[in-house]
Image (cartoon, rainbow, N blue to C red):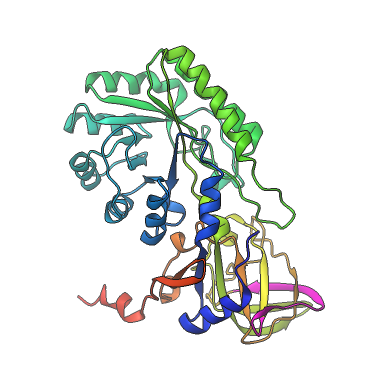
Amino acid sequence: MKRINASLLERLAAEHGTPLYVYDANVIRERIASLRSFDLIRYAQKACSNIHVLRLMRDEGIAVDAVSLGEIERGVRVGYGAGGAKSGIVYTADVIDEATLERVIELGVPVNAGSPDMLDQLGRRNPGHEVWLRVNPGFGHGHSKKTNTGGEWSKHGIWHETLDQALRLIEKHHLDLVGLHMHIGSGSDFEHLREVCDAMVAQVRALGIDVKAISGGGGLPIPYGVDEAAFDTGALHRLWDDARKEVESIVGHSVHLEIEPGRYLVGEAGQLVSRVRSTKRMGPNRFVLIDAGFHNLVRPAMYGSYHEIDVVHDGARAGGQREPSVVAGPLCESGDVFTQEEGGLVVPRELPEARVGDLVVLHDAGAYASAMASNYNTHPLAPEVLVDGDSARLIRRRQTVDELLALEDL
């Protein structure tokens, strides 16, 4: 686990207020470096789509995946090109609306199609467009049922037994098939990732198609707990490189190998910094109430996800005697609790004493925190700061209530 200096967090909190997201650019670069053996790293920007983070990715030679028109525009805003098989932007989805359809055609953004209907709608409007096929291999895996993106209960991808329908549409509309993409879920382990590699090879062999590229998707785990081991990206590349070689033997030429991480690149780089506003006892339970809630970090409430928690007192990590504590936010919801497991079971965490005014830092909040934030209870979106070596700069200011109300001032 990477921790930003507590005194720096205290200074940033004093300068920008809380709650506050703080990202470490060097951690992002370290994670990028660990995946350089792949031909192309394509960042799944839904994890954290701030344009300054995207600009860092672009400067490091990382391409991006977009899952909405807004994410396409974010990529364009920071200078990503769109066209070509190794495009800076690829649009991945299971549906495509009219506005997005027009824009991907205008820009020449390759489409990673998760349904035959997407291929038909795109092909009717723009024959010859570059496409990928996102394949649902018939199984999935993830750290939660809600992050499982494969199998018969998942909405994602084209069912592996109906790919012939997709191929007929590609032929009918003379679409340019770039390759196959498989992603079975976030937090997958090596056993399941090996199955994905095998499924990729089996699909190419069974379909008898030519592909220029394959993508192993994302879902790479990070160690949320202090005792969890780091993910072995070298072993992952060996798995996919072996699969790539088998595919090359089938199609008779070299094949481009992509990986599409999101959380892996940014998750450990982020901290959600909050301020203690109240402490109280409810029967035997000690509650630490902070000014961040699930409108800032929804993963514990949505998935029962674990995030390490530190208390910062007077610019240093608090020590001393620990006792079971429930850390909760300000929202008018009983589920606004950071120390819970899937299903809403509240599990107190052993923490040092926290006093009003102390900071509470939730770690590994670089992915699916700010990106999934909301205005619930009319709370403005929190600011974001990027720390890069000795510098720390604001990369998103705090939203105001007036800005929220202006949308309704009609």
Q: Nearer the viewer, residue 335 or 266?
A: 266
Work out whether residue 302 can be spotted.
Answer: no
SS majority, magenta: strand
Residue 165, compared with residue 396, is above or below; it is: above
Residue 245 among magenta residues? no
* 284 relative to 90 in the view: left or right: right
The residue depicted at 28 percent of the width and 34 percent of the height is: 84
Q: Which residues are magenta?
A: 313-328
Percent coordinates x, y for residue 399 in the rendering:
37, 75
Q: Quadrant of residue 126?
A: top left
Percent coordinates x, y for residue 143 in the rendering:
62, 46
Quarter holding the C terminus is bottom left
Task: Tally the marks.
Answer: 0
Q: Nearer the viewer, residue 6 or 217?
A: 6
Residue 195, compared with residue 274, is above or below; it is: above
Residue 321 among magenta residues? yes
Percent coordinates x, y for residue 75 in the rendering:
32, 51
Quarter holding the N terminus is bottom right
Residue 158, compared with residue 354, is above or below; it is: above
Q: Quadrant of residue 323?
A: bottom right
* 166 relative to 107 in the view: left or right: right
Q: Quadrant of residue 355?
A: bottom right
The residue depicted at 35 percent of the width and 35 percent of the height is: 112
* 365 relative to 155 in the view: left or right: right
Q: Nearer the viewer, residue 12 or 351?
A: 12
Work out whether residue 211 can be spotted.
Answer: yes
Percent coordinates x, y for residue 345 in the rendering:
68, 61
In the current view of this chain or complex, which residue is farthest to the front? Answer: 390
